[in-house]
Amino acid sequence: MERYGKRKIPIEKFELSESFTDCHHVFSRADKCLFIALENGVKELVLHFTSYPAPILTILAAKSLRELVLRECTLMPVSLSNGVVNCNSLRKISLSDVTLDENMLQTLLNSCPLIISFVLENCPGIEVVKIKSDSLKVLKIHHYCECDIDAPNLVSLDYTGSEIPGLNIARKSSQLKNSEIFLDCISSLNTAWFCKLRKFLSNSSSWSEVSLKCDEINITDLQMDHIGSTGGVDVLNLSIIECPTTFVDALLWSCHPGRLNLISIDTETVTGFIDHLIYMSHSTSHGWNNQLKEIKAFDGKNQSLQLGSEELAKRITEGEQPYFILDW
């Protein structure tokens, strides 16, 4: 790096990686290399350095930086008393297993007004994430926290968590080009939860893939209204332990999946789920629950299966991968 520093050789990408150190001497050497890279106009910076106190204010002051990737670093403690300048060049930020607090995260996002891509994965110290950006187009959050997303021009959303995020996107972007949502529902699911799910999914006319892992279901009073539209889901992956009929009603009131992949180890649970789907497709009642026109089952080779619900349930619980196509 000394040669780069003395000759002012431009640096396109600089990557610093060390997974098993917590030594101030090593950190000091890392700082020197990093400063040379920043002074030489680095555009892409990758720091994968366990416990390394990344000098984030110095990094944000760089004029040429376009992409920042931090893994296992720490952004704590950092004094923000002197203020932070905007990093107008930065377009992409990725934080994985980075130690920081919500104040630091908000400062980081506010300092990058032209960001188009943001990734947040498993960062300790973050319980609430609030994102407000007109420029953001690609968002990936794999973190169990409360989220509030205001990104009018978002086109790609990849979210994994236990809470349904708040989401505000513009009407012109209402059909996300790519969206993957995984909800690990660690709390009991009730009517209010499904109302929130319906409201979330109504933000877009079509979702690429939604996955729900449901352990405890407690729906005693449906009383579901018709406020908002039912979100269309291309693929719904559903993992369940129990399945009261009210759960099936609430689920299909919340979203209209085109393809349903069902995962369970209990044959009786799966049989009950399939039976209720068939009942709904044959229902002549008026209202939201008669919108399902037809349900068809297919095996892993996309061959049609003409089987009863018990046989289908047996195949699913034995690890085979039949799936269902729902016509609305």
Image (cartoon, rainbow, N blue to C red):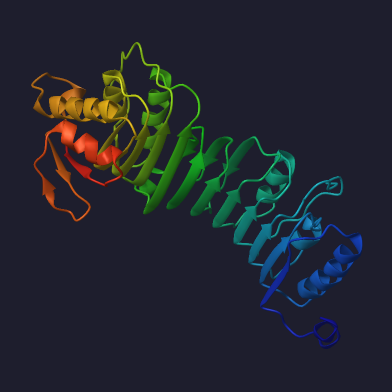
On the question of residue 96 being in view, the answer is: yes
The quarter of the picture where the N terminus appears is: bottom right
Is residue 67 depicted above or below 150 in this figure? below
Q: Residue at x 14, y 29 (%)?
A: 278
Q: In the rendering, at what x and y percent does residue 83 appear?
A: 82, 49
Q: Quadrant of residue 63?
A: bottom right
Q: Nearer the viewer, residue 54 or 217?
A: 217
Left or right relative to 119: residue 313: left
Residue depicted at x 91% and y 64%: 25
In the displayed structure image, the side of residue 68 where residue 76 appears, left or right: right
Furthest toward the right, the residue is: 25
- Look at the image and tell me whether residue 153 can be seen: no
- All told, the count of numbered labels is 0
**Residue beneath the point at 83% across and 68% down:** 30
In the displayed structure image, the side of residue 182 where residue 281 appears, left or right: left
Which residue is depicted at the point 54% across and 57% down?
116
Q: Residue furthest top?
A: 221
Quadrant including the C terminus: top left
**Nearest to the observer: residue 26 or residue 59:** 26
Quadrant in the picture for residue 3: bottom right
Vertical side of 42 occupied by 47: above or below: above
Q: Is residue 215 left or right of residue 97?
A: left
User: Which picture quadrant has residue 289?
Assistant: top left
* Residue 72 percent coordinates (x, y): 71, 54
Name the spot of residue 95 as percent of width and height, x first.
Answer: 64, 53
